[in-house]
Image (tube, rainbow, N blue to C red):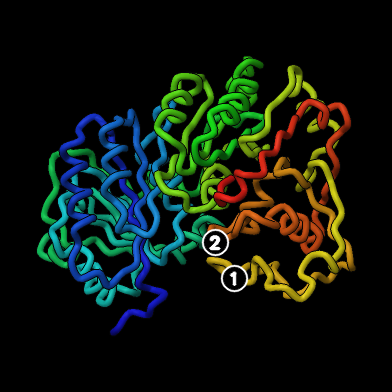
Amino acid sequence: MELSAEAKKLSVCLYAEGTTPDRAFRLLDALRNASGLSFSWELLVGANSPRYDLREYISAEHRTARKVVWFESGVRRTQEALWRALMTNSTASWILLIDDHVSLDSRWHESLTNTLQSHSDRDVIALGADPLSCEKQSVAARGFLLKSSWLRRRLRTSDASTNVLIAPANELERFGLGGFEAGDYVSLAALLDEIESVSSEQPPILSTCICTYGDHPELVLRGVDSVLKENIPASEMELLIGCNDVSRDVMIQLERRALHSPYSLFIRSPYNFNKSGIQRFTFRLSRAPYILSLDDDMYFLPGWFSEMKAFLDAERPFDVAGRLHTLTNRGWWSGKKRPYDQFVRRKHWWREKTPHGVEVHFPAGQCYLVRRDFVLRHDYPDCGMRIDWDDVLLGDLVAQMEGRQVAFSDSLAKRIIVDEIASRGQHGGG
């Protein structure tokens, strides 16, 4: 059976400790030098205790992948947690979960095509399974191949069935797997638990997500410093910094400031794969019920967090909040090519024309507060979105889904300062 073009899309989610780069270099070389490229593919890397040499190697060498994203954590996360963060941001039909104990041969890419032709009816294929764990739901393996449609079902309900294949040793060549070095097996049951629960810990009140682009240290460092100076307890807020094609100097300074803080995480792409992609990562990695999304040309005045807590206590539950502006349809689509007439995945809420009249109310200025469950349920933002009109589309989403949108209080709005620099928009960054 020939695979459809849609099925020939693969996300390679690589987990690396970062302390043994030789293993990772060897695996990355095999990914880069693949022959028989019948897939389009993207590389998503999750690292604990990351090393500069590994990160820079990925940045310099992996331009064959359609997208490369580096996720690094200031707080140690389990392999299952990092895999979850990566695969929920996949834009492909199949997801390959591996760590740096796995070896791939030079024809791994072609081998996967043959494998999926034979096992396209499966949801999960366990790779290098522990022979002592035979039961499908509790199998422990070195890696997994997942069908994205199954993953989306599991994210919606934990009752979704799972059609598991435990790949026998004599079939590993089908996957282009050269072998496995000594390493920990990963339990499918643990992976399913991680899929179904963001965290068993008490989540913070707020996730603050700052997305930055390019080489603008005077902006992003000012914004991050304004957060860190508040000395907010980790139990009340987490800080996620999405670094989209930032310079090495900016990255070093960010690490010095925030990596060792009690609540910071980094998500880094060595290429500019657009703001919505890096923003999507931060939203899905967040644990709090509400997410404050900011561009890097913003900063806070002292006392902003106490005002934010007071606003949340007074207004929640709501779906979107911000400095609300109004735009008429005449100045929006207005016969021009719509900026969102194509999504990576078709949205259930999208309509060709807005059904709610001639006005759209939206949180302008690239500063808004959203309910995490609302944006995740409606798959916002889309990986394929451009940076212009994204705030208008968010307002349109709220209107079409009849959500609740409220304006920031005056006392809160006065403590969030926007310092737009027009030239940055020419580069397509966040």
* Vertical relation: 55 (above or below) 134: above
Residue positioned 63% across, 33% down in the render: 208
Using the numbered discs, state the Cα–Cα distance from disc 1 to disc 2 in whole angstroms.
Answer: 8 Å
Residue at the bottom extreme, as displayed: 1
Q: Are marks 1 and 2 in contact (CB under 8 Å)?
A: yes
For the residue labelled by badge 1, is the local secondary structure a helix, a strand or a loop? loop
Residue positioned 66% across, 32% down in the render: 206
Q: Is residue 119 left or right of residue 314?
A: left
Residue positioned 62% across, 48% down in the render: 425
For the residue labelled by badge 2, is the local secondary structure a helix, a strand or a loop? loop
Image position, residue 283 (x, y; %): 58, 44
Any part of residue 214 in sight: yes
- Return the mark for residue 384: 2
Image position, residue 15 (x, y; %): 31, 42
| Viewer-nearest residue: 361 or 150 | 361
| Residue denoted by label 1 | 342
Q: Is residue 262 left or right of residue 425?
A: left
* Vertical relation: 373 (above or below) 211: below
Image position, residue 38 (x, y; %): 27, 72
